[in-house]
Amino acid sequence: MAQGRTIEDLDRWDLAGLGREYLMAGHLIDRVAMPQVIGRLGSAGMVEVAVEEWSAASPLYTERVRRLLGFDRDHDVAAMFKGMQFDVGAPHEFLDFRYWVDGPDRGGFRLDHCGALLDVEPMGEEFVRAVCHDVEDPTFAATLCASDPRARIRPVHRPPRPSPEHHPHCEWVVEVDEGADPAPAPAVTGRLRDSRLLGLTVPLMPLDDPDGGRTDYRGPLDPDLRLEDLGPLALRALCREFAIQGHLLVLAFASALRERVEPEAVSAAVVAAQTGTAGVVAARLARWLRRRPWAPTEAEDVVAQVLELHPMLSPRDYVDVWVDGDGETLVVLGDCPGTEEVVALGWPALLADGRADGALAAAVEGAWPGATAVPVEPPFGRRRAWRVVVSEEPLPERPEVTLARFSSGAEFEFRRVGERPA
């Protein structure tokens, strides 16, 4: 990047904020993806695709986080909950998990706030049951069994709620049944085992970070963990993992949909999800950026900074993107593992072949009203390039972005941030 900051330049506190934005970005993918499925396969088809998507991806990315933070040899209930604390399916506070541990083989959690529930409640009880029963049961089990295949989860209570004032939104108990046969890994995880994402190295964390904060998550579960508790070395690695989680979900979604509809419909659904997510996430990042004392103020510089940090274009060892914000802002994509993905249709490949120009434009439009991106001739040896164009008047919002804004996650404000009070 010719000017502005890369993720390597951010300090511990900025990285914690960016990490929360990446968690929310991964969660928002389905806000556009699932309506595409409902339109083609109905609500029953949506449940099937969602279950396969999360069951395929979450055990794989949970394995990576366990290795990264050094609790991969732990198989107790606390370790299961640790994995859930770094899952894009549960952005901090938006899905406000409150955990407790009674012992190595028993614990539980409640959701004091569930943004996913609040998003579907206006749609009626059928959709509440689809999300909180039909999807949650198998996907919670798939995630927990990545830590111990003898884990069993059961609800104490869950929606539909008797009234809008009923709290907590749900409550669950998790136990490890020593006498149970280990649950098999979800068969759908096999679809992603050859992904180029899983070939990306999980870095080995040092014992200490000279800039403070934790470098691992060995030891007891912290029920009120905040990303600020971790040091910048771990946070940079986690931001990379959160971006990887999002890409894995996209591949799992495309793979599940490919089993049910024609290729053109798969491409259209993935592009729609990419466009809506890209625009809303860019708007969130721009809002986060404005609160930074080092934030740029000129339109093209803001756009370049948002794109530099956008999870759609991360991590750089999967998506080879160059953002030049010096004068005329160019975004250039080269050949990389993401453009050569082998298991399903992913976002970098769609960008590379020109099918997702609208997604890149949506990200630019979200970063700055009145800005957009147009394809230009790429430099020699590169796959695709776009130039940022800025005008005085805001452009009409793309329908995919409007659809993504249906989720309250689009405007959700994180509040339990920063250093813990003494």
Image (cartoon, rainbow, N blue to C red):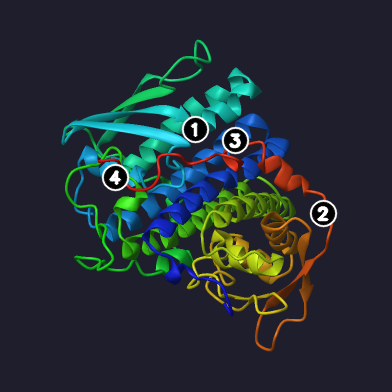
Q: Which residue is mark 1?
A: 135
Q: Which mark is residue 179?
A: none
Q: Can you give x and y, in whole percent of width and height, for residue 221 in the image?
A: 23, 42
User: Dots 3 and 2: beta carbons under 8 Å?
Assistant: no
Name which residue type carries label 4. Answer: Lys
Confirm whether residue 36 shows in the render: no
Vertical placement of residue 135 versus 330, above or below: above
| Circle 2: element type | loop
Query: Which numbered mark, 2 or 4, is in the foreground of this view?
Result: 2
Query: Which numbered mark, 1 or 4, is in the foreground of this view?
Result: 4
**Can you say which quadrant of the picture contains the C terminus?**
top left
Q: Which residue is mark 2?
A: 395
Q: Can you give x and y, in whole percent of width and height, for residue 74 in the image?
A: 19, 49
Q: Which mark is residue 82?
A: 4
Q: Is residue 183 left or right of residue 163?
A: left
Q: Can you give x and y, in whole percent of width and height, for residue 152 in the image?
A: 29, 31
Q: Which residue is mark 3?
A: 408
What residue is rendered at 65% in x and 69% in y? 301
Q: Is residue 90 left or right of residue 69?
A: right
